[in-house]
Amino acid sequence: MADPSSYRPKPGQIPDSPGVYRFRDEHRRVIYVGKAKSLRQRLANYFQDLAGLHPRTRTMVTTAASVEWTVVSTEVEALQLEYSWIKEYDPRFNVKYRDDKSYPYLAVTMNEEFPRVQVMRGHKKKGVRYFGPYAHAWAIRDTVDLLLRVFPVRTCSAGVFKNASRTGRPCLLGYIGKCSAPCVGRISPDDHWELADEFCDFMTGRTGTYLRRLEKQMTEAAEEMEYERAARLRDDIGALKKAMEKNAVVLADATDADLIAVAEDELEAAVQIFHVRGGRVRGQRGWVTDKVEEITTGALVEHALQQLYGEETGDAVPKEVLVPALPDPLEPVQEWLTARRGSNVSLRIPQRGDKRALMETVERNAQQSLVLHKTKRASDLTTRSRALEEIAEALDLDSAPLRIECYDISHLQGDDVVASMVVFEDGLARKSEYRRFEIKGRVGDTQVWHGEGQDDVRSMHEVISRRFRRYLADKERTGEWADGNPGDPDDPGNPDAAEAVADAPIASSLTEDDGRPKRFAYPPQLVVVDGGQPQVAAAKRALDELGIDDIAVCGLAKRLEEVWLPDDDDPVVLPRTSEGLYLLQRVRDEAHRFAITYQRTKRAKRFRAGPLDDVPGLGETRKQALVKHFGSMKRLRSATIDQICEVPGIGRKTAETIVAAFARAAPPAPAVNTATGEIMDEEESDTTSGSPGEPVAAGSPEDRRGQET
């Protein structure tokens, strides 16, 4: 625990101007980012008597080892820089809203020649129109199914579209009138693009124009006694009205607005957002955050605005944003929103009328979201804290292990031996710092074993040694952590390792102010291994050989869920209802999942490997060109050097290498169709690979999946 007075800036050093400040820990990792109208006044608040600070603020300043700041011209620039740094550094003591689910959007790919309507999640892409978010994907599909009667826009994937273009036959939607079938030329690209644009106009709330147009066409068809056409138009009008009814009118003046509500207690806060477009609720989402700092409702709203609009521009930022409390100061936030939209944005608290009534509904949703979140055991801050304290007490640690790393070994009967490292910080998974290893059977420059066979103990020793050798090498070489991932410094066959050593002084100067996470940069307080006493002993021995004595080690055995410690003949048995045991189980199971996923990936890659993979300089493009030219691997295998030279991009030397690679390769095992059980000809298996009932070579790893660990 650091003393804040040890790194407190001298009087007069801090400027009295707007800016953004960063607190760093002893490993130079950024742990908090803040902004201030006056840096001098704001930073002075952190260096007062510790007894007068909020408990969370006290924890932050005692964890930090240094503070630095950047002066900007205006408070708007400070707001933008704070948002950028929070996104870049992911500081642990900042408010970070956790999206409680990945909300689906209705997306129209207007950046394609033939725009497609589909459900999308994740980051937004340029040139794509988004509507939502929706609570459920099925709600999007129901809406699209109704609208396709009137706006028959393409909904198929690229593969289905290309196949229909090749065969000249549209899919089922094209036959039943729910797709204009641009794949077979029934509509031109320009007309289809206009159709997609009309679909977007309807989704944005411009519904009256299309309803009036359809009603006029229906009347004209009835007058001309085209009753079948009139009936179809009547059904189209009904479909549009039904789609509109799914989003009831909540604001009579057709307002475009976002409503943000906050429900909070001493530890956490839940935020709910309703997106209203054209007076109708078009989307809803919610976030939850731990209050790791003393923060007001207005500050929570400010962070929510940064999360919502930090990467949005134009119409994605509405004209009006309604909030329960205004940020302080208000003007920089309002100017920032206006700049992102390109026109004036009103940020205010609704006082009366429909908007106030709708805000109360949003507030009720936020309160319910917070209550629901509290029932989720793994995300409860109090429960996580209790779990870490129980682990510290059971293992006799000096303090709660805020960073836990867990390692697991996975293989299939001794083949494709791999390992995983998962990281939990403050009781939550930190997936950006997960790592995976391919077991090589050596430590440093010493070949200690062959690397094959079922030897989890030696594998565990190698993994722990490699992980902490890298940590010590970077620390000794630069005093900090070099940028990037040059690879294991103990790998004599890794050219990047030598370059990293040679360039160490340059890397250090380039990364002095860089606080972004780097591979293996930060040591854990606790290392957990998946296994019993032998694995624990191997991990402890690896740390002892490296001279590391300040990291605790334990193992969790699957059979009886016992916790093993080094040099202890008897395990530590935690109660089955213990939150600490529950957390260790989650960490262990996550390491096992991550390891076995990597092992299966390697196994599948090895299984798909062929003689062409041994040809140096032959990439995927030329491999595909070879197979396409000859039609199958069987014909390619029997081809002569001159015949192979006829393939564009293949020279004589490469052709000779290909023929030699086929000559060295053993004859392939017979392929078996798992759907019928019959042995297939090689040419047939080449052309059917990837289809249902995919052929699997006899005795392949796929037949032994149940034997993997």
Image (cartoon, helix red, strand yellow):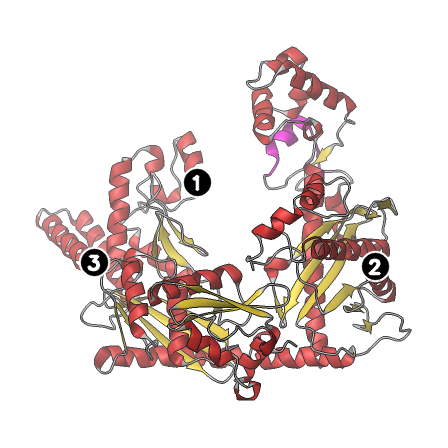
Between residue 588 and residue 513, name the one nearer to us. Answer: 513
Between residue 601 and residue 584, name the one nearer to us. Answer: 584
Q: Give the percent coordinates (x, y) of residue 523.
A: 70, 64
**Residues at marks 1 and 2, CA–CA distance in whole angstroms:** 51 Å
Say the numbered circle drawn on residue 542: 2
| Badge nearest the viewer, 1 or 2 | 2
Extreme residue toward the left, this view: 223
Q: Tag 2: Cα neighbours inside 10 Å, few (<14), some, or many (≥20)?
A: many
Question: In this rendering, does residue 377 appear at all?
Answer: no
Q: Secondary structure at mark 1?
A: helix
The C terminus: image quadrant: bottom right
Say the numbered circle drawn on residue 206: 3
**Residues at marks 2 and 3, CA–CA distance in whole angstroms:** 67 Å
* Left or right: 342, with 453 as reference point: left
Q: Give the percent coordinates (x, y) of residue 487.
A: 69, 47
* Left or right: 659, with 234 as reference point: right
Extreme residue toward the right, this view: 569
Q: Quadrant of residue 237?
A: bottom left
Between residue 494 and residue 457, name the one nearer to us. Answer: 494
Above or below: residue 301 compared with residue 495: below
Above or below: residue 664 compared with residue 570: above
Residue plotted at (53% across, 88% down): 52
Instruction: Residue under label 1, please give it.
Output: 158
Residue type, mark 3 in image: Arg
Q: Secondary structure at mark 3?
A: loop
Q: Are marks 3 and 1 in contact (CB under 8 Å)?
A: no
Span colored in magenta:
678-690
**Residues at marks 3 and 1, CA–CA distance in whole angstroms:** 30 Å
The N terminus: image quadrant: bottom right
Within the magenta stretch, is there residue 555? no
Q: Are marks 2 and 3 in contact (CB under 8 Å)?
A: no
